[in-house]
């Protein structure tokens, strides 16, 4: 009976290792994907990778003509946060799919 228990434990360890490998692959894929955030009706566009790196910032030249520097700065922050949030939420959704919504913390497996 004990031997059967060890077999189950070994099977569980094998499954955990597979889950870890899949989670790592998904995380790496999401980190390389680009996510877009916009603000001001599209006047500001920020592209960020899922890793959290900002790739580009585009600002409509008309926005500068307003002379409202603080507004431009605020719109950049809003757009950047939107892009980064989309990346985090995408990663969370993919991890939830992987674990079947069981609430397992995959982060501890890396």
Image (spheres, rainbow, N blue to C red):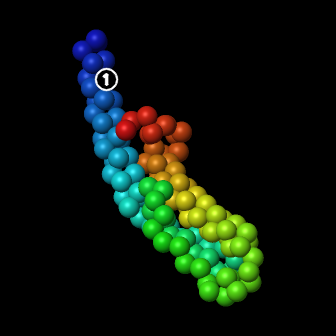
Foreground: 48 or 33?
A: 48
Which residue is located at x 41 percent, y 64 percent? 33
Quarter placement of the N terminus: top left
Residue 32 location (% of width, % of height): 38, 61
Q: Is residue 94 above or below residue 108?
A: below
Which residue is located at x 34 percent, y 35 percent? 16
Residue 62 location (% of width, % of height): 67, 88
Which residue is located at x 51 percent, y 59 percent? 87
Residue 95 location (% of width, % of height): 46, 49
**Which residue has dot 1 on it?**
9
Residue 60 can be seen, yes or no: yes
Foreground: 11 or 25?
A: 25
Residue 90 can be seen, yes or no: no
User: Of helix, strand and loop, which one carries label 1?
Assistant: helix
How many labels sit on residues?
Answer: 1
Quarter placement of the C terminus: top left
Q: Is residue 24 left or right of residue 79?
A: left
Q: Is residue 110 left or right of residue 75?
A: left
Residue 45 location (% of width, % of height): 57, 75
Q: Is residue 15 above or below residue 73?
A: above
Foreground: 23 or 64?
A: 64
Which residue is located at x 61 percent, y 61 percent? 81
How crowded is the residue under tag 1: few (<14 C-alpha within 10 Å), some, or many (20+)? few
| Residue 49 placement: quadrant | bottom left
């Amino acid at each position: 009976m004990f031997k059967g228990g060890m077999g189950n434990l070994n099977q569980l360890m094998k499954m955990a290792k597979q889950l870890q490998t899949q989670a790592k692959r998904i995380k790496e894929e999401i980190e390389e994907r680009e996510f877009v955030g916009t603000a001001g009706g599209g006047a500001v566009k920020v592209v960020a990778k899922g890793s959290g790196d900002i790739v580009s910032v585009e600002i409509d030249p008309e926005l500068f003509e307003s002379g409202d520097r603080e507004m431009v700065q605020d719109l950049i922050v809003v757009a950047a946060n939107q892009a980064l949030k989309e990346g985090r939420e995408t990663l969370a959704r993919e991890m939830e799919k992987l674990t079947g919504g069981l609430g397992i913390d995959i982060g501890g497996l890396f």
